[in-house]
Image: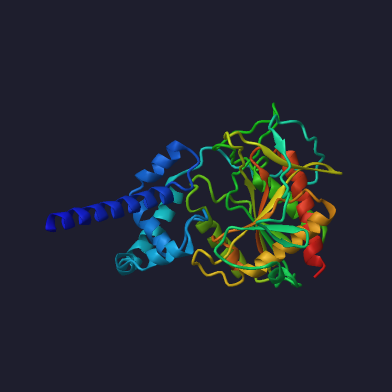
């Protein structure tokens, strides 16, 4: 019996070690786009303690895979609790060193292409699809807006009715536009390629989502809304920790400009079919071929403080209803996840995915214009 008990104990310890190892590998490589990048992340000697700290805090790095139950279980670890201050110091040092030691290898263009320019919609050779729900099953439906709830939170369509909390103030600026993953780019037509900094990424702000942010800022300004556009890229040269770095900037802007009540984090999606082939998502509108838009909304389901997540979601639902009233196929369903995506900073925060990697820049720019007009209409009508 004693020998059998020892064997069982060794198996349990081995299983526990394997589980921790797998958890570390998943977390450490979650932000890596390539196999090489994943291997570099695993070489980081600080990756394990930093990963365990973030998991203890209920933070999955913005990936949306850590459940509330898992976060709570990990948070009970006596070892992590006793070493909390040391690991916090290590995390801070790791983030700072990563930014100081790595220098971008290509210049970042600071002068944007003129917003509101004519769009040509040249074919970029990527297969196009228009994604629309065909049934209400599995969705929460509020007016015209369909919502995919992938979070651990429970809410209904009734919770999304009524006015959202955020409102424009009389001071300026009123809206902050940021790009946590600013190097995200699109698929250009032949002859219009950019210098890549990664797969479907570039630091050239004439071609990535920073350019899309220029368009949104211009349209909002036309509506008389005061905007600050932060054109920094927080995912280059280091992808991991981008949300931590953009959070610092958002908090600094809010401290400097208390008049800011809306924060828009502009991204683009990346979509592939069952065989791994990328495709673009489009909506045929009177103005041309637009990329489809997606709102990704966070909650406190991952264990991080986010008391006004429902107000954020009410805002997104209101904007979605405004846009769909004029453009029935422009929007994909709203996605709700456990991660908070820095949306806890204001009651008027949204993450907007403008198209996907397979879309052309022109398709994304048209979508940005339509979004900006609809967003302005929604918040000005309150």
Q: In this view, does 254 lie to the left or right of 174?
A: left
Q: Where is residue 286 in the image (x, y as percent from the top left)?
A: 87, 44
Say which of 77 and 166 sits in front. Answer: 77
The N terminus, quarter of image: bottom left
Say which of 66 and 183 sits in front. Answer: 66
- For image coordinates 39% across by 40% down, the residue present is 39
- For image coordinates 79% across by 51% down, the residue present is 370
Compared with 244, 28 (above or below) is above
Say which of 171 and 339 sits in front. Answer: 339
Figure quadrant of residue 275: top right
Compared with 187, 70 (above or below) is below
Compared with 293, 86 (above or below) is below
- For image coordinates 40% across by 41% down, the residue present is 40
Q: How many labels does the image show?
A: 0
Q: Where is residue 238 in the image (x, y as percent from the top left)?
A: 48, 47
Q: Where is residue 234 in the image (x, y as percent from the top left)?
A: 55, 51
**Furthest-right residue in view?**
286
Colouring style = rainbow
Q: In this view, does 76 lie to the left or right of 2?
A: right
The C terminus, quarter of image: bottom right
Residue 221 seen in the figure: no
**Furthest-top residue in view?**
191
Q: In this view, does 5 lie to the left or right of 54?
A: left
Residue 23 seen in the figure: yes
Q: Position of residue 381 (x, y in %)?
A: 82, 67
């Amino acid at each position: 019996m004693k020998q059998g008990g020892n064997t069982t104990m060794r198996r349990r310890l081995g299983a526990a070690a394997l589980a921790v190892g797998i958890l570390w590998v998943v977390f450490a490589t979650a932000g890596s786009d390539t196999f090489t990048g994943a291997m570099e992340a695993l070489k980081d000697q600080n990756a394990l303690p930093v990963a365990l700290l973030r998991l203890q805090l209920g933070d999955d790095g913005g990936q949306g895979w850590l459940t509330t139950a898992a976060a709570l279980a990990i948070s009970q670890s006596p070892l992590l609790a006793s070493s909390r201050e040391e690991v916090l110091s290590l995390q801070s040092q790791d983030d700072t060193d990563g930014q100081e030691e790595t220098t971008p290898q290509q210049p970042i263009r600071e002068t944007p292409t003129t917003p509101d320019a004519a769009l040509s919609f040249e074919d970029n050779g990527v297969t196009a699809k228009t994604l629309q729900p065909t049934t209400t099953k599995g969705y929460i439906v509020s007016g015209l807006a369909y919502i995919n709830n992938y979070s651990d939170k429970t809410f209904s369509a009734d919770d999304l009715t009524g006015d959202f909390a955020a409102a424009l103030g009389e001071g300026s600026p009123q809206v902050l536009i940021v790009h946590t993953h600013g190097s995200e780019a699109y698929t250009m037509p032949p002859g219009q390629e950019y210098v890549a900094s990664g797969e479907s990424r570039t630091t050239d702000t004439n071609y990535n989502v920073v350019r899309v942010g220029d368009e949104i800022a211009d349209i909002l300004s036309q509506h008389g809304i005061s905007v600050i556009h932060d054109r920094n890229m927080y995912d280059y040269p280091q992808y991991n920790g981008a949300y931590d770095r953009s959070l610092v900037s958002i908090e600094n802007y809010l401290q400097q400009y208390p008049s800011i009540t809306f924060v828009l984090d502009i991204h683009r999606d990346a979509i592939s079919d069952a065989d791994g082939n990328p495709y673009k998502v489009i909506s045929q509108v009177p103005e041309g071929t637009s990329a489809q838009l997606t709102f990704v909304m966070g909650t406190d389901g991952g264990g991080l403080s986010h008391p006004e997540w429902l107000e954020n979601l009410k805002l997104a639902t209101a904007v979605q209803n405004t846009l769909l009233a004029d453009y029935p196929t422009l929007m994909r369903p709203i996605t709700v996840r456990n991660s908070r995506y820095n949306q806890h900073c204001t009651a008027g925060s949204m993450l907007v995915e403008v198209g996907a990697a397979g879309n052309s820049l022109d398709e994304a720019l048209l979508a940005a214009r339509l979004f900006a007009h609809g967003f302005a209409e929604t918040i000005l009508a309150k």
